[in-house]
């Protein structure tokens, strides 16, 4: 059971934690297990079973769930392991205990895999980090692993695994092409958010988003789909979608969570539900061989897939639900190290963004001598610093607003000097900001990192004796962390200050030059990640 392999001890916090190649291996194992369960092939089933009463699997569901919780419970029971449950109604979380302290305690009681559902987004990623350090400090036999069973509006990676497996079943196991319609509440639906990265197992993907604007997919996930090469189309209703001919052969419905959206939306709920509910008159318009899916449960009064469809060829959601237990049995076996030792990835594991040189010091000796040009309204200083080219191209009011933030972030508020909005000498319609402070300044690498994060694209000049002695050009860093005044703006994120969990903010640069929170994935501009901006 303790064979070392690439799966043993791994956490699954978001679907990307398992590579495409690793997921395809998992699906091959699920195929074998499913066949063995259908035939009651005990010899094959034993190959997958952890069969260790001291191996602890702990369910921590801090948000209501029936299907995911029971699917995991039955999967865990299959393994003949120690299965425990934390009752959220009477748990220590309700007494003000931190997530970290609770899971430190449970980790010390020989629990190895934690299955966590929470309204807090990014909680599994944080627990993976902090509990790994706890295990190392205390020489625990096994490092705890965490499986995200749904975190707020963020992701639901195990639902994504069972969805992908079911799509593959109905695709004759081909990964060449997938055409999928996502229908319903795409705003709140973590199951559809996981598809932004999850569907990358298919080589060619078309995603049709069917939802009224009030329930539309957040831009962050639409952008990610497009970055991943998907063709993405949007429609405001099923009716509008069926007016065109290029229809998906797989439809994935979600339950509208209108109760989360206030009285204004509830007053229009009948109208909104109608846009995303399938009706009998639509059946004849469907593509031959179409399958419907749903993560379940359906709303008993207003199901987006009405029950008259249960006994039709469209029904893929019941098999999809049953597949959930099979997928979770295999996932637990992989993380426990029971299976997977023979798997050898053909691609190297992904690495964190490199700390490339985003702070460039200009070689002043090699610069050609130019006639000194001073921006209008700015007089040269004898000793001090000048930060130039701030927010180039923004409006004067936007530049002034951001210069106040820069001054606060760099601790320049108590210094003499000022700020100025000017224009470039080549284009008098393009504005830029300038901050100047007289005095003697010695800036550390940490100061330069802060400046690059809060004012990418700027130029910093350090001046002594009336001449520039150091010039730096600053660009957006690949990561930003270890600054106490950083904060994710998502109030549901485990790292948001109002959660009082003491989780330090961490951001990664995205392909389109935003900062994505390492925990909840929310995208921010460089202007939005500072606490002083969000007070």
Image (cartoon, rainbow, N blue to C red):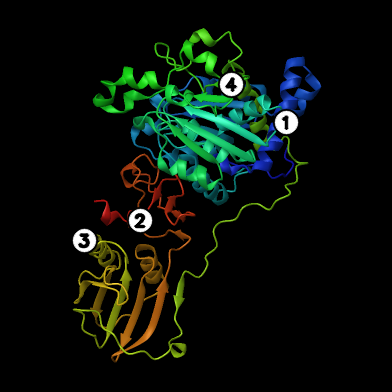
Give the number of the mark in front: 1 or 4. 4
Horizontal side of residue 249 vs 2, given as left or right: left
Looking at this view, is 512 or 124 the one in front? 512
Mark-to-mark CA distance, 4 and 2: 50 Å
The answer to whether the residue labelled 4 contacts the one labelled 2, judged by CB atoms less than 8 Å apart, is: no
Q: In this view, does 433 lie above or below 288?
A: below
Give the mark nearer the N terminus: 3 vs 4: 4
User: Is any atom of residue 174 visible in this view?
Assistant: yes
Q: Mark 1 points at which residue?
A: 29
Q: Which mark is residue 314?
A: none
- Classify 10 Å Cα crowding around label 4: few (below 14), some (14-19), many (20 and above): some
- Residue at image point 68% right, 53% down: 348
- Residue at image point 30% right, 72% down: 427
The answer to whether the residue labelled 3 contacts the one labelled 4, judged by CB atoms less than 8 Å apart, is: no
Q: Mark 2 points at which residue?
A: 486
Give the mark nearer the N terminus: 3 vs 2: 3
Q: In this view, does 161 lie above or below 6?
A: above
Q: Is mark 1 on a helix, strand or loop?
A: helix
Mark-to-mark CA distance, 1 and 4: 31 Å
- Classify 10 Å Cα crowding around label 2: few (below 14), some (14-19), many (20 and above): many
Q: Mark 3 points at which residue?
A: 397
Quadrant of the image occupied by residue 323: top right
Horizontal side of residue 92 vs 124, given as left or right: left
Horizontal side of residue 172 vs 519, given as left or right: right
Q: Mark 4 points at which residue?
A: 287
């Amino acid at each position: 059971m303790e064979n070392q392999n690439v799966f043993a001890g791994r956490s699954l916090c978001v679907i990307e934690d398992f590579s495409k190649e690793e997921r395809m291996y998992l699906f091959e194992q699920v195929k074998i297990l499913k066949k063995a369960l259908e035939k009651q092939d005990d010899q094959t089933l034993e190959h997958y079973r952890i069969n260790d009463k001291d191996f602890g699997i702990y369910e921590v569901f801090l948000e209501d769930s029936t299907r995911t919780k029971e699917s995991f419970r039955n999967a865990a029971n299959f393994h003949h392991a120690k299965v425990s449950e934390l009752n959220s109604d009477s748990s220590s979380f309700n007494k003000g205990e931190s997530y970290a302290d609770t899971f430190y305690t449970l980790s010390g009681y020989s629990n190895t895999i934690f299955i966590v559902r929470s309204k807090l987004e990014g909680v599994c990623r944080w627990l993976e980090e902090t509990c790994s350090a706890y295990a190392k400090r205390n020489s625990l036999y096994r490092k705890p692993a965490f499986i995200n069973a749904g975190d707020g509006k963020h992701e639901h990676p195990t639902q994504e695994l069972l969805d992908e497996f079911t799509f593959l079943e109905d695709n004759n196991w081909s990964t060449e092409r997938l055409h999928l319609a996502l229908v319903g509440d795409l705003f709140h639906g973590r199951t559809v958010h996981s598809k932004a990265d999850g569907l990358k197992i298919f080589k060619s993907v078309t995603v049709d988003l069917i939802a009224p604007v009030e329930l539309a997919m957040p831009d962050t996930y639409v952008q990610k789909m497009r970055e991943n090469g998907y063709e993405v189309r949007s429609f405001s209703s099923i009716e509008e979608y069926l007016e065109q001919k290029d229809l998906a052969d797989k439809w994935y419905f979600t339950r509208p969570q209108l109760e989360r959206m206030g009285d204004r939306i509830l007053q229009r709920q009948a109208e909104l539900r109608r846009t995303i509910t399938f009706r009998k008159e639509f059946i004849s318009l469907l593509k031959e061989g179409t399958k419907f899916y749903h993560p379940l449960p359906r709303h008993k009064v207003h199901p987006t897939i009405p029950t008259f469809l249960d006994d039709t060829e469209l029904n893929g959601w019941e098999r999809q639900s049953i597949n959930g237990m099979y997928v979770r049995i295999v996932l637990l076996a992989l993380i426990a190290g029971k299976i997977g030792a023979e798997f050898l990835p053909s691609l190297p594991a992904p690495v964190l963004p490199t700390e490339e040189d985003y702070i460039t010091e200009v070689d002043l000796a090699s610069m050609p001598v130019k006639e000194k040009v001073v921006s209008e309204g700015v007089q040269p200083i004898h000793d001090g610093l000048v930060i130039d080219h701030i927010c180039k191209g923004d409006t004067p009011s936007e530049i002034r607003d951001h210069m106040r933030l820069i001054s606060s972030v760099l601790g320049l508020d108590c210094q003499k000097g000022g700020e100025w909005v000017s224009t470039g000498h080549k284009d008098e319609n393009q504005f830029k900001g300038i901050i100047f402070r007289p005095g003697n300044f010695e800036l550390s690498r940490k100061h330069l990192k802060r400046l690059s994060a809060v004012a990418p694209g700027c130029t910093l000049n350090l001046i002594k004796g009336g001449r520039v002695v150091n010039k730096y050009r600053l660009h957006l860093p690949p990561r930003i962390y270890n600054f106490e005044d950083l904060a994710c703006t998502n109030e549901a994120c485990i790292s948001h200050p109002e959660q009082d969990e003491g989780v330090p903010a961490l951001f990664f640069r995205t392909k389109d030059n935003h900062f994505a929170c390492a925990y909840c994935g929310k995208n921010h501009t460089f202007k939005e990640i500072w606490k002083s901006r969000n007070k």
